[in-house]
Image (spheres, rainbow, N blue to C red):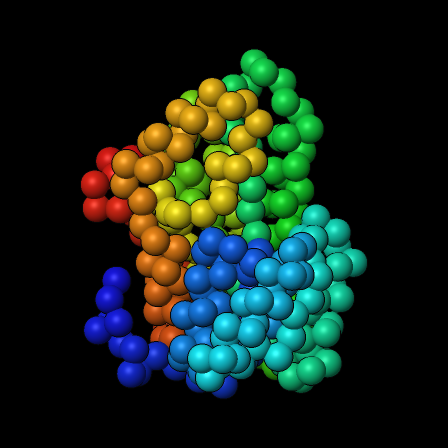
Amino acid sequence: MSDSLGSNTLDIAGKVIAITGASSGIGEATALRLAKHGALLALGARRTDRLEALAARIREAGGEAPLVHALDVTRREEVEAFVQATLARHGRIDVLVNNAGVMPLSRMADLKVDEWERMVDVNVKGVLFGIGAVLPSMNAQRSGQIVNVSSVAGRQVFATAAVYCATKFAVHALSEGLRQESPFLRVTTIAPGAVESELTSTISDPAMKREVDEVFRKEQLPADAIARAIAFAIGQPADVDVNELVVRPTAQPY
């Protein structure tokens, strides 16, 4: 997706956009991309040192990232605090990008129940906490957009990824249900294929991590490819809701 799809016409400038998992990968790239379009950014993640460095880069390039906030999306009170801090500073949130996610792949027979629980906590409950935190203000202003970053694993199941796929299928279901309930809320699901990120770093089985890394390295999109898709969805007119974008490397077969 090139900038020719509307870099000069995207309606992003001045929008207050909160991003979870903003310290690396898709979240970081999305912050950099949206800043170029004039967004007012609130950045949340656990690694605040990386957030501060990212905010400094954005400001040095002429963008605006006035809020950096420590955020663990598995903790409901921290998600609420992130949203409330953004509202206190700007008076509104136009867009929430639910981006934080983990992918500790394993075979079901390995019984890595703690890892299953972690995936549900981050990939599902983290998204729900984000939605629950911003809905009251978006309902009050009768406008807003929630962008949920899912995966092609939310559309197709893969061996060794059963639980991860389940969490991403859940994201698709939550997004569609939320969309149907509101006549004014825009809801977008972004489903990336193989992308440069830290996702495989959460795989605890060294042999499986090597195997997955080898597959990922064959054809990988830069994180900015997904950031451009997110910017495209956000930048449409208020009466246009881009419900789902699937973005894969051209050569990726699945």
Q: Quadrant of the C terminus?
A: top left
Q: How many marks?
A: 0
Residue at 73% over, 81% down: 88
Q: Is residue 11 left or right of residue 142?
A: left
Can residue 11 be seen by looking at this rendering? yes
Q: Is residue 222 left or right of residue 28?
A: left
In this rendering, the answer to whether 13 lies above or below 213 is below
Give the image location of residue 232, x and y in percent.
35, 69
Give the image location of residue 192, x and y in percent.
38, 49
Q: Quadrant of the N terminus?
A: bottom left
Give the image location of residue 211, x and y in percent.
40, 25
In this rendering, the answer to whether 171 lies above or below 52 is above
Give the image location of residue 198, x and y in percent.
49, 44
In this rendering, the answer to whether 228 lies above or below 165 is below
Residue at 33% over, 58% down: 225
Task: Name the residue nearer the viewer: 207 or 130.
Answer: 207
Can residue 167 be seen by looking at this rendering? no
Residue 253: which quarter of the image? top left
Residue at 56% over, 74% down: 56
Residue 124: which quarter of the image? top right
Residue at 28% over, 36% down: 218
Task: Residue at the far right: name it.
Answer: 77
Q: Is residue 137 left or right of residue 147?
A: right
Task: Residue at the far top: name it.
Answer: 109
